[in-house]
Image (tube, rainbow, N blue to C red):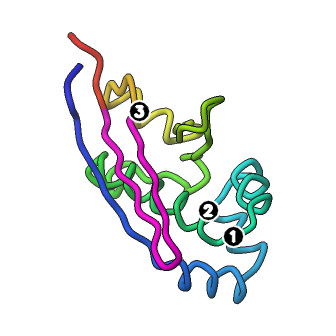
Amino acid sequence: MNILGIGVDIVEIDRMKAAINKWGAHFLNKIFTEREIKYSNSKRFCHQHFAARFAAKEAVVKAFGGTNKYPIQWTDIEILNDKEGRPVVEFSGDAIKLKELKNIDQVMLTLSHSKHYAVANAMLLTKEK
């Protein structure tokens, strides 16, 4: 495997909370999938989980080198958890096309959050040629 790119992002929990409070469902549905919304809302401190998922989406976009040339929707990058609780990325729509164009085989992802911040790191690995 070869590393195509790495990305990191940090989000202030209070800014995420303010955005959700101000724009509500319109904001949530523009940024997050139904599964992400359901998961985050099931948590006691849901804003931390929304912020971590947003940071992860940003980290993935940064790992791709930005998406100006290949625009995608926020909901085309979905941050879920596997059976062991590890974060995983699922692509849909135009993000699948970008993943295939860049020959991405695997996305390694870490998330963390505290009372005030959420952070995510993403690493894109390409298939061996």
Q: Measured along the vertical axis of the image, is residue 76 above or below residue 128?
A: below
* Marks 2,1: beta carbons within 8 A: yes
Residue found at the very far top of the displayed protein = 129
Q: Which residue is mark 3?
A: 99
Q: Which residue is mark 1?
A: 45
Return the x and y of residue 90 as percentages of the image width and height. 56, 36
Residue 49 disc label: 2
Return the x and y of residue 78 as percentages of the image width and height. 59, 46
Residue placed most toward the observer, 18 or 25: 18
Tell me what residue is drawn at x 69 percent, y 52 percent. Answer: 36
- Secondary structure mainly formed by the magenta segment: strand
- From the viewer's perspective, is the residue at label 2 or at label 3 nearer? 2
Residue type (three-letter) at the residue carrying disc 3: Lys
- From the viewer's perspective, is the residue at label 2 or at label 1 nearer? 1
Residue type (three-letter) at the residue carrying disc 1: Phe
Tell me what residue is drawn at x 41 percent, y 42 percent. Answer: 109
